[in-house]
Structures are given as C-alpha cells and as structure tokens.
Image (cartoon, rainbow, N blue to C red):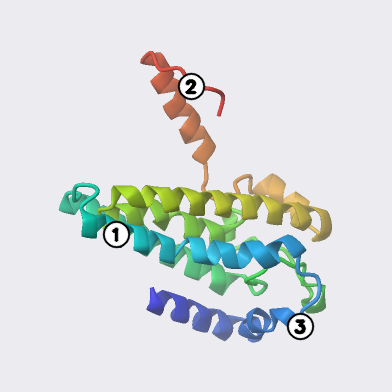
Amino acid sequence: MVLAGVGGRWWGERRHPGLLLERQNLKESAGIKPWDELLSPFMSLSISFPIYIVAGLNHHFGWSKVFPVWVNILGLFLVAFRFIFATCAVAENCFFSSMVRIQLDRGHQVCDSGPYRFVRHPGYGGNALPLPGMVMAFSSLWAILPVAVALAIIMIRTALEDRPLQAELPGYTEYVKRVRYRLIPGIWRIIARVRDNLCKNGLQFSHL
C-alpha cells in the first residue's frame, strides 16, 4: 500500500511536473466545490481505518469464521489490481487532484487515455474495487458493514463530481457519450442479470 501510494505519486510527478504541488496546495486553490471539502477527507477515512478496526475486532472476538485460504488469496489479487488501476490513473491524468475543482488556472482538459478510455473515474474505481477484496483478504464477514459505507460514499462523490465536470469542463459532455461508465464497465448490466436470474428462481426484488 505504501509503495503504491508513494510510487504512484512519484510516477505521476515524473510524467506531469507540478501534479504534487497541485495536490499539496489545495487550500490556496480556487474553485474547490464546498461539498467536497467535507466529502473528500470523509472518503479517505472510510476506505481505511474503519475496515481495519472492524476486521481486527472480528478476529479478536471471533464474530465470524475464518475464510478458506483461496478466498484470502483472491482478495489480495483484487487489492493488488486496485493499486495498479489507481496508480495508472494518477500517472495518466495531469489534472488528478485530491479534491474536486475545475483547474482553469492550469488549463484543465479532459483526459481520455489510459484507464480513462474505459471508465470516467478510474481513481474512484481503483478505490472501490479492493474493498470487497479486503473483506476476503481479512477473513472478516463483519467488515462488509464499513465496506458498504465506503462504497456508498465513493458512488455519491463520483456522481457529484461528474455534474460540474459536465457543466463546466469543455469537451466533457462529448467524453461522456464515448465513455458511458463512471466506475466499473458494465456493472449495472451485471447486476440486472443477477437480479433477473434470482427472480426466475422465485425471488422477487424491487427495481434496482
């Protein structure tokens, strides 16, 4: 995690000098969306410590059974894939900021290369993908609770960020037409298929 975090930022700065300065001097930057001043640190917190704490308490008190080793290994692969995906997003986008703002002072343009060819917010997708993997890797069924909260925050922030980008960033509406998915390609199609299959087996669900 440390290598991916530090290495990704180093790689991004090598490719796009000034990227780290943008991320460090946000308090002095103009145009930060007021709602993100609260949501950004809240999301950073939700994807880390609560999950570790709940998983640790789970093991200490024996709230749930330990998962098979193959489930742990699969979870670790999901976590590793997340860091690769998120690191590529940081390195590819020279406007990758830690808070939502249209960077007119830096000549903000749409990034549609690298992982941005597949999803519009690969940074958020990279944070969402490992969360189920952490439940699997930690062998903690109760970790699903903080993971669900973290996923909800990620989806809310992604939706909120997409709105000003479409309204204020030139070329973004055309980009939305080319790249339909915000986080994970085809995720709602997969959910719909699972729902339909469950309904065929006699289970009734409300509209997703």
Lateral position of residue 184 relative to residue 38, left or right: left
Question: In the depicted view, which residue is nearer to us: 22 or 117?
Answer: 22
Can you tell which mark lies on residue 57? Answer: 1
Q: Using a 10 Å C-alpha cutoff, classify the residue at mark 2 as few (fewer than 14 neighbours), some (14 to 19) or many (20 or more).
A: few
Q: Residue at x 57, y 84 (%)?
A: 13
Q: Residue at horizontal 46%, vertical 81%?
A: 6
Q: Secondary structure at mark 1?
A: helix
Above or below 174: residue 186: above
Q: Earlier in the sequence, mark 1 or mark 3?
A: 3
Query: Foreground: 83 or 205?
Result: 205
- Alpha-carbon span between mark 2 and mark 1: 33 Å
- The residue that label 3 is drawn on is 28
> Which quadrant does the N terminus fall into?
bottom left
Say left or right for 100 vs 147. Answer: right
Residue 171 appears in which quarter of the rendering?
bottom right
Q: Is residue 93 above or below residue 50?
A: below
Regarding residue 61, the answer to whether it shows in the image is: yes
Rounded to the nearest angstrom, the CA distance separating label 3 from label 2 is 48 Å
Q: Nearer the viewer, residue 146 or 176?
A: 146
Give the image location of residue 79, x and y in percent.
Answer: 36, 61
Q: Sequence-wise, which precedes: disc 2 or disc 1?
A: 1
Residue bearing the label numbered 2: 205
Instruction: Where is residue 85? Give x, y as percent.
Output: 46, 63
Amino acid tagged 2: Phe
What amino acid is labelled 1 in the image?
A: Leu
Mark 1 to mark 3 CA distance (whole Å)? 40 Å
